[in-house]
Image (spheres, helix red, strand yellow):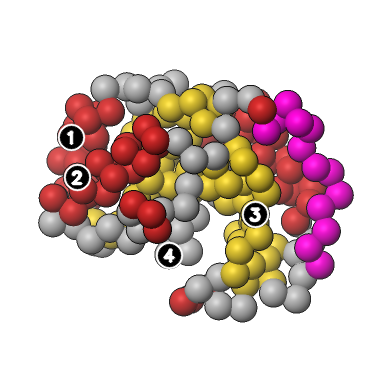
Amino acid sequence: MMQRYNIALLPVDAELATYCVGFAQQNFSTQQDAYLLGNDAVAHVTLCQFHAEAADIAKLWPKLRAMNAKQLCALSFAHLYFGAGRNDHTGMIWAGFAVAPQENLSELQAGVHDLVAAQGLQPLTAKGADYFPHLTLARLDVFASLTVQNWPEQEFWDQRHGFGLSLGLSDENGVYQQCLHADFECEAVRATAL
């Protein structure tokens, strides 16, 4: 059976994952529309989403591990973003933390995208200049009030946060719901799956 999968970076620190869930819940719980971090949505930064069979995943994960060699990424966030939904998400607004530009992240994402395509699978995530690395907090109704009551402290923006490679199940909206494989002890995954 074809399912939607997500190769993503997950926070290796449960405190970061918990903070992101708390921020989303505190600021967007009344405006959210079918996506709120923590409500069956795991904190993550997508590298590549795609549809596949379970047998494809069994072959893909070892190749991903060999490519990444258990390397952790240190990412920082640039700003809080609000972006208009497209295609199936027209009439919605996405809110999240944009990841600061970083060459090794762009290289990792392009490599993952190419590996998925080389397996005969169709990547659903853009690559290159069209790739927008971010950690989604919520999907909001277009008529929602976009006020944020509790902004992150400057330390949050200045700090580099550790992330590790994972492969998980997503729903059709791209909500990362279940980690199937990870290159690290994944306390953060359990912390965000409320």
In the figure, 23 relative to 124: above or below? above
**Mark 2 near mark 1, Cβ–Cβ under 8 Å?**
yes
Q: Nearer the viewer, residue 131 or 117?
A: 131
With respect to residue 175, does 192 lie above or below?
A: above
Which sits in the foreground, 4 or 139? 139
Q: Residue at x 34, y 52 (%)?
A: 128
- Label 1: which residue? 63
Tell me if label 2 and label 4 are in contact, CB under 8 Å: no
Residue 170's tag is none
Q: CA distance from mark 1 to mark 4?
A: 25 Å
Q: Is residue 166 above or below residue 51?
A: above
Badge number at residue 81? 3
Mark 3 and mark 2 lie on one chain; the one further toward the N terminus is: 3
Q: Which residue is mark 4?
A: 172
Kindly identify which residue carries mark 2: 115
Q: Secondary structure at mark 3?
A: strand
Q: Is residue 55 left or right of residue 181?
A: left
Give how far across and how far down residue 144 sits, in percent.
77, 70
